[in-house]
Image (cartoon, rainbow, N blue to C red):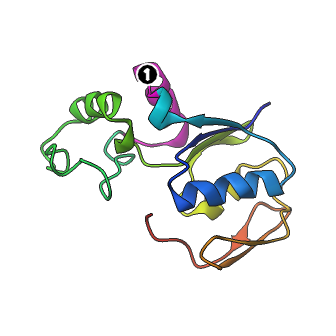
Amino acid sequence: MTIVIHHNPDCGTSRNVLEMIRASGEEPVVIDYLKTGWTRPQLLALFAGAGLTPRTALRVSKSPAEELGLTDPSVDDETILAAMLEHPILVNRPIVVTQKGIRLCRPSEAVLEILPNAAIGTFRKEDGEIVAGSASGTASGAGEAAS
């Protein structure tokens, strides 16, 4: 199965995840979702597979979520989903799909849980943090702030 990353090239976390996938020996299909946008069935399938809801997948920082009123707890998932279709930046990223599952890869080390070969050796993220991938799909590293 092909690995797919829903990627934002302007996001450091997304770039780190892409490079971790490549370090595992795979060349993923890269979908720049800010250019392609989303479809309703696509988002529903990704969220279901990753155990997310539109609210839990909502990107609040560096997005128009607050100005659109989407952070109000009374806003329902259907409204959030409709806004995500209109404003693709509202979907948190990166979302990666492999034969082992679907993950919102924040922090970037979360991708190791679903890579067929998580033995990426020692990986240095853009911020200099070292991540050590292992065959068991676990990683060491302190995590990552939203970018």
Does 138 appear above or below 97? below
**Left or right of 63 in this view: 109:** right
**Left or right of 54 in this view: 113:** right
Q: What's the magenta region?
A: 37-53
Please name whichever residue, 147 or 140, is drawn nearer the observer in this view of the structure.
147
Please name whichever residue, 34 or 138, is drawn nearer the observer in this view of the structure.
34
Location of the C terminus by quadrant is bottom left
**Left or right of 136 in this view: 16:** left
The secondary structure that most of the magenta stretch takes on is helix
**Observer able to see residue 113:** no
Report x, y in % for residue 61.
31, 59
Indicate yes or no whether the magenta region holds residue 45. yes
- Label 1 sits on residue: 39
Residue at the location (58% across, 47% down)?
103
Please name whichever residue, 125 or 103, is drawn nearer the observer in this view of the structure.
125
**Left or right of 55 in this view: 131:** right
**Total number of numbered labels?**
1
Report x, y in % for residue 33.
50, 35
Report x, y in % for residue 83.
26, 33
* Element type where label 1 sits in the image: loop
**Observer able to see residue 78:** yes
Residue at the location (62% across, 56% down)?
15
Q: Which kind of residue does numbered mark 1 sit on?
A: Thr
Report x, y in % for residue 117.
85, 52
Residue at the location (32% across, 35% down)?
87
Task: Give neighbour class at mark 1: few <14, some 14-19, many 20+ (Cα, 10 Å).
Answer: some
Indicate yes or no whether the magenta region holds residue 100. no
Residue at the location (46% across, 71% down)?
145
